[in-house]
Image (cartoon, rainbow, N blue to C red):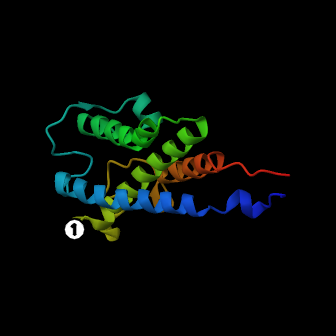
């Protein structure tokens, strides 16, 4: 069977279910973070250590300071996403690409939902004036959202199931 462009670019049922699950997880975790942080985003009022902005954070972390809260929660979520691989005892680079793509998608959606669902913000305050911890904006969203979206698409594309040609 010859593969078509549709086979290469249209997500299959399993991929759609995975995306739905990641969106559901992001929804729940956004609500947890709203309960933890309240209106003070980026752990502003939490008793946690902080590494001030520097060239490394500006390059790889969007110009935000690193907090102990975020270092631990990012690591914890990454480990949660990798649990099925450990449980099943099967790992490939393609699976790793999908896991990383799902983790990035989770943080992208969770961050956006934190604003949408947070009574202190909502969409009307989703801008550089009200969200100072997102330093770099392009169009109407933080630059991170654009780079994360491209990364997710690329990782999902390279992690897709190979199509057998006969």
Which x, y percent locates residue 72?
Answer: 28, 35
User: Label 1 belongs to which residue?
Assistant: 119
* Residue closer to the observer: 33 or 10: 10
Identify which residue is drawn at 42% across, 56% down.
22
Residue 3 appears in which quarter of the rendering? bottom right
* Residue closer to the observer: 96 or 54: 96
Q: How many numbered discs sit on the rendered protein?
A: 1
Q: Is residue 68 left or right of residue 138?
A: left
How packed mark 1 is, by other alpha carbons closer than 10 Å (few <14, some 14-19, many 20 or more), is few
Which x, y percent locates residue 86?
Answer: 43, 35
Vertical arrangement, residue 39 with respect to residue 80, above or below? below
* Residue closer to the observer: 58 or 144: 144
Identify which residue is drawn at 24% across, 34% down.
68
* Residue closer to the observer: 86 or 74: 86
Element under disc 1: loop
Residue furthest front in the image:
88
Which x, y percent locates residue 18?
Answer: 49, 57
The quarter of the picture where the N terminus appears is bottom right
Identify which residue is drawn at 15% across, 45% down.
45
Q: Is residue 123 left or right of residue 50?
A: right
Q: Is residue 53 left or right of residue 34?
A: right
Identify which residue is drawn at 41% across, 38% down.
87
**Does the rendering let one see residue 128?**
no
Vertical arrangement, residue 23 with respect to residue 86, above or below? below
Residue 82 appears in which quarter of the rendering? top left
Q: Is residue 7 left or right of residue 54?
A: right
Which x, y percent locates residue 81?
Answer: 41, 44
**Does the rendering let one see residue 101?**
yes
């Amino acid at each position: 069977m010859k593969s078509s462009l549709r086979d290469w670019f249209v997500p299959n049922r399993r991929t759609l279910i995975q995306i739905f699950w990641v969106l559901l997880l992001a929804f729940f975790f956004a609500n947890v973070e709203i309960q933890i942080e309240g209106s003070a985003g980026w752990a502003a009022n939490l008793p946690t250590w902080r590494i001030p902005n520097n060239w490394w954070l500006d390059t790889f972390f969007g110009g935000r300071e690193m907090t102990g809260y975020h270092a631990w929660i990012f690591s914890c979520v990454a480990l949660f996403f990798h649990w099925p691989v450990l449980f099943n005892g099967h790992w490939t680079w393609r699976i790793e690409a999908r896991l990383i793509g799902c983790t990035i998608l989770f943080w992208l959606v969770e961050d956006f939902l934190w604003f949408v669902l947070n009574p202190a913000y909502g969409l009307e305050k989703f801008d550089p004036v009200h969200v100072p911890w997102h330093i770099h904006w392009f169009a109407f969203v933080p630059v991170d959202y654009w780079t994360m979206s491209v990364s997710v698409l690329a990782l999902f594309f390279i992690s897709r199931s190979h199509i057998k040609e006969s």
